[in-house]
Amino acid sequence: KAGVTQTPRYLIKTRGQQVTLSCSPISGHRSVSWYQQTPGQGLQFLFEYFSETQRNKGNFPGRFSGRQFSNSRSEMNVSTLELGDSALYLCASRKDRQNEKLFFGSGTQLSVL
Amino acid sequence: LAKTTQPISMDSYEGQEVNITCSHNNIATNDYITWYQQFPSQGPRFIIQGYKTKVTNEVASLFIPADRKSSTLSLPRVSLSDTAVYYCLVGGHKYGNKLVFGAGTILRVKS
């Protein structure tokens, strides 16, 4: 069974640009959540999607948004990039929202210059 | 209010048993306790999950006391490759199902 796939693996952008990250969950998993990780900050919850609907949102500005498609694949978008958005963005999938067993992808390392 | 509390870091030597404790005083009745391991620049990896008493798999054991307000991850005979950050995650049912990770414990294994 294929794991969670995130693309691209690395990304370099400049301030003010926007970026879209992609996540393909494990087959059969309907929940996709996104996390931002910066050095010393740990894993910060961004949002979770289930059945194409955002179910939860963390404390991030509106520049961070996402969506989920009917095949459970998810995208995350960050507009008007700031230097502080440089981070490892992780996507995790789980079978349903009653199970805390998450499967993470390898992440997208975003550098904002 | 933090959902989970873990030691910031721990040091050990190869071949020793390591126990990492997590406090979760506000755990809800239907919350499970899940532990993850993370290496630099990688996503966290599931280690073990439990609800009560003791759970054991091929890599670790998880001990949960009767009041479930804490849990202990036990790693037997650690090796250098066990150097990583370990996260305790308590189910989000009490918090609108948000899966919020704590700061984690940095485990350093020395030779």
Image: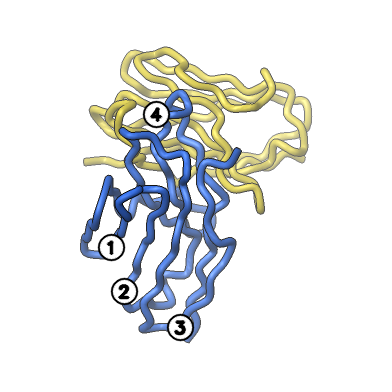
Query: Where does label 2 land, which residue?
Result: B76
To which quarter of the image does residue B76 belong? Answer: bottom left
Find numbered disc 4 in the image and state the secondary structure of the residue it sits on. Answer: helix
Above or below, B64 against B76 in this view is above
- Judging by colour alone, the chain drawn in yellow in this rendered image is A
Could you say which quadrant of the image residue B63 lies in? bottom left
Chain painted in blue in the figure: B
Q: Which residue is mark 3?
A: B13
Instruction: Residue B13 in the image: state x and y as whole percent.
Output: 45, 83
Q: Could you tell me the amino acid type at mark 1?
A: Ser
Q: Earlier in the sequence, mark 1 or mark 3?
A: 3
Gap between marks 2 and 4 measured at Cα? 31 Å
Kind of residue at badge 4: His
In whole angstroms, how far apart are the C-alphas of marks 3 and 2?
Answer: 11 Å
| Distance of label 2 from label 1 (alpha carbons) | 8 Å
Q: Residue at x 55, y 43 (%)?
A: A43
Q: The disc numbered 1 marks a residue on which chain?
A: B
Please name the residue shown 57% across and 42% down the image: B2
CA neighbours of label 1 inside 10 A, class few (<14), some (14 to 19), many (20+): many
Instruction: Note whether A56 is above or below B98 in the view shown.
Output: above
Q: Which residue is tagged 1?
A: B61
Q: Earlier in the sequence, mark 2 or mark 1?
A: 1
Q: Earlier in the sequence, mark 3 or mark 2?
A: 3
Circles 1 and 3, Cβ within 8 Å, touching? The answer is: no
What element does badge 2 sit on?
Answer: loop
Amino acid type, mark 3:
Tyr
Q: Is residue A7 visible?
A: no
Position of residue B15 relative to residue B1, above or below, is below
Residue found at x 52% / y 60%: B105
